[in-house]
Amino acid sequence: MNKTELTQYIKSEALRLGFDICGITKAQAVDKRIQAEYRLWISDARHGTMQYLERNSEKRFDPTLLVEGCRSIIVVAMNYYPQQKISGISDYAIGKDYHKVVKERLFLLLKSINEKTGTAGRAFCDSAPILERYWAVQAGLGWIGKNRQFIIPGKGSCFFLGELVIDAELDYDKPFEKNLCGDCKKCIEACPSRALNENGFDARRCLSYLTIEYRGDLPQNCGNMLGECFYGCDRCSAACPHNRFSTPNTTEELQPQKELLEMRREDWEILTKEEYETLFSGSAVERCGYEQLMRNIKASKK
Ligand code: SF4
Ligand code: SF4
């Protein structure tokens, strides 16, 4: 199989395995301007308590240090826009944990490539110091919006990203050079906590960060801003006009279980630890833990 045949094979396999789109870029150091922007964001402490974002900066800025001998980054995206929404919980978190769902398919893709060519590599989904959205832009899939989400033209931003970093050279896609946000500010206007502004994103103010990542007491004014949300906040995503293109996903593992669909607001308020474990075992909501979820439910609007 020559380089071009292998590239085409990988892209068609990615679609066959359930990914919605696939692009490929060369593994090399991250653009210096992006590195500087990231360093400034960290030095301003806008990442809050997410200290893991401070670590491994050499690997984060150069995937050839993360995966020795790698030459190509295959970037895939998987639609998570739900068939039915669950009030209070972010759309991305209502099915099985996306890290597992995406990585299972990436491992199948890697196995399939390896059987053809002996190629080795590693799979990532929000699971390593790798600038996922940056590489998705480099692979030509879309742009990073003012809401800091990755947007695929004609498809929207409700997608999980995953990467396969491999040691084979491939044909590379052209980077996506446009930013289709233009003068739009709908996400900034929709953000209840002013975590988003024209100068960027401050995680410390973000309701998604506060309800999922932050372990301390919630700020006093948080309840009003949360509204009904108690795990994440989708307002900047819901406000984005590019998400009018979203279509419900059909991936079996991403569908919510029946018990979750039946939950009412009054049920959440008296949720027991056993019920929590039944509802969220194997889901991304496990990241939050029972006590923290109850902290959020108590703070959110009745
Ligand atoms: S998730 Fe909510 S709080 Fe965070 S930036 Fe978006 S709109 Fe603002
Ligand atoms: S709402 Fe508007 S500014 Fe925000 S990400 Fe979407 S297109 Fe860009």
Image: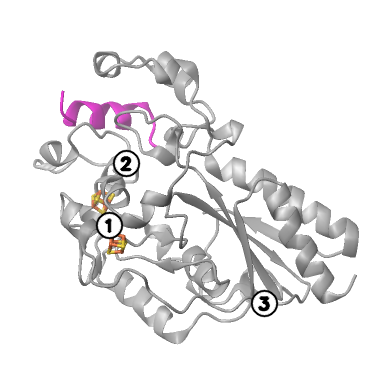
Q: Mark 2, residues whose alpha carbon is within 10 Å: few (<14), some, or many (≥20)?
A: many
Q: What residue is at 42 percent from the left and 51 percent from the top?
A: 245
Which amino acid lies under the numbered mark 3 shown in the image of this protein? Tyr
Spatial CA span between label 3 and label 2: 35 Å
Spatial CA span between label 2 and label 1: 12 Å
Say which of 157 and 101 sits in front: 157
User: Magenta span: helix, strand or loop, mainly?
Assistant: helix
- Nearer the N terminus, badge 3 or badge 2? 3
Mark 2 touches mark 1? (CB < 8 Å): no
Q: Mark 1, residues whose alpha carbon is within 10 Å: few (<14), some, or many (≥20)?
A: many
The residue that mark 3 highlights is 172
Identify the disc placed on residue 203: 1
- Nearer the N terminus, badge 3 or badge 1? 3
Identify the disc placed on residue 8: none
Q: Is mark 2 within 8 Å of ligand 1?
A: yes
Q: In the picture provided, is 217 more to the left or to the right than 177?
A: left
Q: Number of marks in the image?
A: 3
Which amino acid lies under the numbered mark 1 shown in the image of this protein? Ala
Q: Is residue 199 above or below residue 246?
A: below
- Nearer the N terminus, badge 2 or badge 1? 1
Label 3 element class? loop
Which amino acid lies under the numbered mark 2 shown in the image of this protein? Gly
Between label 3 and label 2, give the one nearer the viewer. 3
Magenta-tinted stretch: 287-302
Q: Is residue 161 above or below residue 117?
A: above
Mark 3 touches mark 2? (CB < 8 Å): no
